[in-house]
Image (cartoon, rainbow, N blue to C red):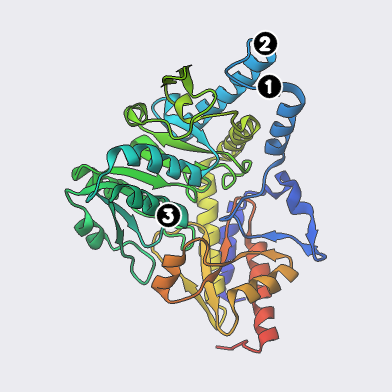
Amino acid sequence: MNAQSSAARAALAPLRLEVAGDFPILSRTVHGRRLVYLDNGATTQKPETVIEAERTFYRESNANIHRGVHWLSQHATDLYEAGRKTVQRFINAAKAEEVVFTRGTTEAINLVAQSWGRAQLKAGDEILITTMEHHSNIVPWQLLCEQTGAVLKVAPINDAGELELDAFAALLGERTRLVAITHVSNALGTVNPLAGLIEQAHAVGATVLVDGAQAVAHQAVDVQALGCDFYAFSGHKLYGPTGIGALYGRHALLAAMPPWQGGGDMIRTVSFERSTYADVPQRFEAGTPNIAGVVGLAAAIDYVSGIGMASIAVHEHALLEHATATLNGIPGLRLIGTAANKAGILSFMVDGIHPHDLGTILDAEGVAIRAGHHCAMPLMTRFGIPGTARASLGVYNDEADIAALAEAIEKAQHMFGTRQTR
């Protein structure tokens, strides 16, 4: 070990959060080896408090909400609406009514596209996205363009994976009605300078939606400070349950939007002649929602808030720097996405080894990563590659996980006969 890596490890040691024991699944073995979970960009593992919150709900509080006059229904309703207030505080929304529960980021974006978008856009209007977007922030807008005649514009990125700011500004104009942009790229880790981008978009009269799926678990998010109009995120990337997420929308925008889905609990009155609709947010929560998921999401937010988002950000930044230095020290490995401002995502290629083969070999060593295009096929086309291997960091990861990752990569190189020396 050289002096530089020794210093990096010494600097990192006090930042270890020592929370792995809170996550039951991390105590298991895979293929007879310790589980090294580095696929947090796909989904995070769940702390015992979240698991227990859902189990307790079903054991002690299960009932349908908003409609029952009995105590259990009212109790379940209180838990559900308390979860809404927890999300409001977490992202600093002005009102709890600005939080709409959805199945996740994907449904939240589709809700905006099919409610706000279909009502507001017409032929010739423009939607601006970026090259680094997840498919969930591309396909809904393509569908909307097909429905309305609007035009999709795409801002380019540079070789480091950073948004080309001058090109973004040049694409904004009087026809730009919506800017939809990721907060943190799921495939590159790039953190976009949102506040300035949102200000520019608003200057031309555009509405702004932010895909926050990869941001909320890693840094504090303040939707009022950002000034965005919509912000979408998923619970399962925030140490919460799958099948639950939230859409933040400025109240005036939500109040003017028509329903997207029809059914129970989103109505005020129904007759065979016409129906009238509930106020927001219930207008957008048709049918029986994922009540236990909301309870679990609130528990997950309480968990990360207890650690402190600032502490999480410091820990993950230090670990990212350490992991970047470690992977850059492996001959034949090339990082894809080297933005100056990054979150804890490392996408990489290893000479002579397909990402899927690499992922399979790493799995045999107990190391879980993601391999493929990461639902970002246009981004992979931009870099001229079929996909990458991706290690993504979470609160429970530490330098021992990075060492295991590096050792497994080197073993794969030996197996393929591609191991190089500097």
311 vs 347, nearest the viewer: 347
| Farthest-out residue, front | 272
The amino acid type of the residue labelled 2 equals His
* Mark 1 to mark 2 CA distance (whole Å): 9 Å
26 vs 325, nearest the viewer: 26
**SS class of the residue under badge 3?**
helix
Place of residue 57 in the rendered image (x, y in percent of width and height, measured from the top left): 71, 27
Seen at 63% across and 41% down, the residue is 241
Q: Nearer the viewer, mark 3 or mark 2?
A: 3
Q: Quickly name the residue at label 2.
A: 70
* Mark 1 to mark 3 CA distance (whole Å): 36 Å
| Mark sitting earlier along the chain (1/2) | 1
The amino acid type of the residue labelled 1 equals Ala
Seen at 71% across and 22% down, the residue is 61
**SS class of the residue under badge 1?**
loop
**Figure check: 21 above or below 335:** above
Q: Quickly name the residue at label 1.
A: 63
253 vs 259, nearest the viewer: 259
- The mark found on residue 139 in the picture is 3
Q: Are marks 1 and 3 in contact (CB under 8 Å)?
A: no
The amino acid type of the residue labelled 3 equals Val
Place of residue 179 in the rendered image (x, y in percent of width and height, measured from the top left): 31, 49
Question: Residue 419 appears in which quarter of the rendering?
Answer: bottom right
| Mark sitting earlier along the chain (1/3) | 1
Q: Nearer the viewer, mark 1 or mark 3?
A: 3
Q: Are marks 1 and 2 in contact (CB under 8 Å)?
A: yes
